[in-house]
Amino acid sequence: MDCRRNSEDELKGIWQSWDEAKKTRFQEKYGDVAQLLFVKLHDALLKAMVCFGDPTYRCFTFNEVDIVLTIKEYSTLLLYDFRDPLRRYWKLNVDFWRPLANLMGVPVDTVKARLKDKNGHCISWSDIRDAIGKASGDRHLALFAFAVYRLIVFPKALGYVSVELANFLFQIEKGVNPAPTVLVETIISLYFIRRKGDKCFLGCAQLLFVWMKSHFRCLHKRFRQVFVPSTKPIEEFLETKWPPNQSIEEWFQNLSTLTYQEIEWRAPWMIRSTVLIGCSGHLWVPLTGIWRAISYSSLMVLRQYGYGQCLI
């Protein structure tokens, strides 16, 4: 498995050039997604854990341990728990050119002329970068969020940004929780790697890495109380001391012999709270991604909140 990566240096430079007031304004609108730029991936762990993915139950089975990616965990990492957790992204059959043109501050014809077919309509990162340089105020923030989501969270085509993300970004600004959508594309990419033999992981590798590492006991915690204004789970994850990185063979051996006692069921940045375990009596909840959709076994998340094993 290879993790598709776009260049992060330019985005890091833009973020680091902002003052604290501007960073705070961005976080209020789009959560903590910018912190993903500073997550240093360790490919060996990701490559090893993919071997234990269960495509049927959308979980990882490490020896006697079944652990599942949860909406609540991803929402917490992205700092979207301040919003209505039931508001989900829904893909609309609309013309994406006009929202993108408005976002970039250029005519619709200009956007159409610059589109490239990269397994879907895309526009180059260089065009978005130029628009960021010319924009100001909320448009500047929106374009930066647009770039981070497309280049880091949904890295489908290297160096290009899908026009469909314009509507996704618009829905985030209206209060939609993006975490389920991020989760969907991650789970689907893992499915295609396990079942179809795909070589490239097209989900958000940074979030998956933080999530997995957080379920091992950290050596020294630097986590503050969750959901106070100064809390930034991803940033605090980066400041916390974790077990050392290992080779893919060592990770594979450790994961294949993992026991209940060795797993950190509740990540140190999580709090106990109400979680979704069904939808209108159905235990499998439909979730929509940017390009595809899945059914999600929400009941399985209970194991990570102190209940018994739920895989049957």
Image (cartoon, rainbow, N blue to C red):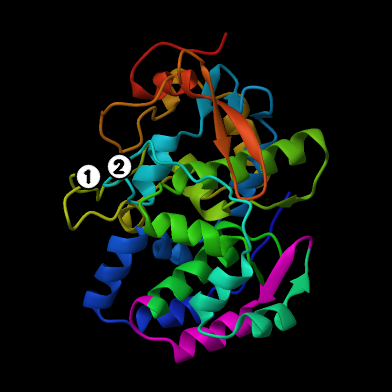
Judging by the rendered image, the residue that carries numbered circle 2 is 269
Question: Is 162 or 53 nearer to us in this picture?
Answer: 162
Q: Is residue 159 visible?
A: no
Q: Over which residues does the magenta segment extend? A: 119-138
Residue 242, horizontal then vertical, whole percent: 40, 47
Q: Position of residue 234 (x, y in %)?
A: 36, 54
Which residue is farthest top?
312
| Disc 2 element | loop
**Does the stretch in magenta take in 241?**
no
Q: Are marks 1 and 2 in contact (CB under 8 Å)?
A: yes
Q: Which residue is mark 1?
A: 226
Horizontal and vertical percent position of residue 33:
42, 60
Left or right, 30 with reference to 3: left
**Residue 5: x %, y % from top left:** 64, 65
Q: Residues within 10 Å of mark 1 (few under 14, many from 20)?
A: some
Which residue lies at the image location 35% right of the left edge and 76% below the top edge?
Answer: 138
Q: Earlier in the sequence, mark 1 or mark 2?
A: 1
Residue 172, above or below 295: below
69 w.r.t. 25: above or below:
above
* Image side of residue 158 versus residue 307, left or right: right
Kindly indicate the quadrant of the structure image that contains residue 64: top right
Against 131, residue 1 (above or below) is above
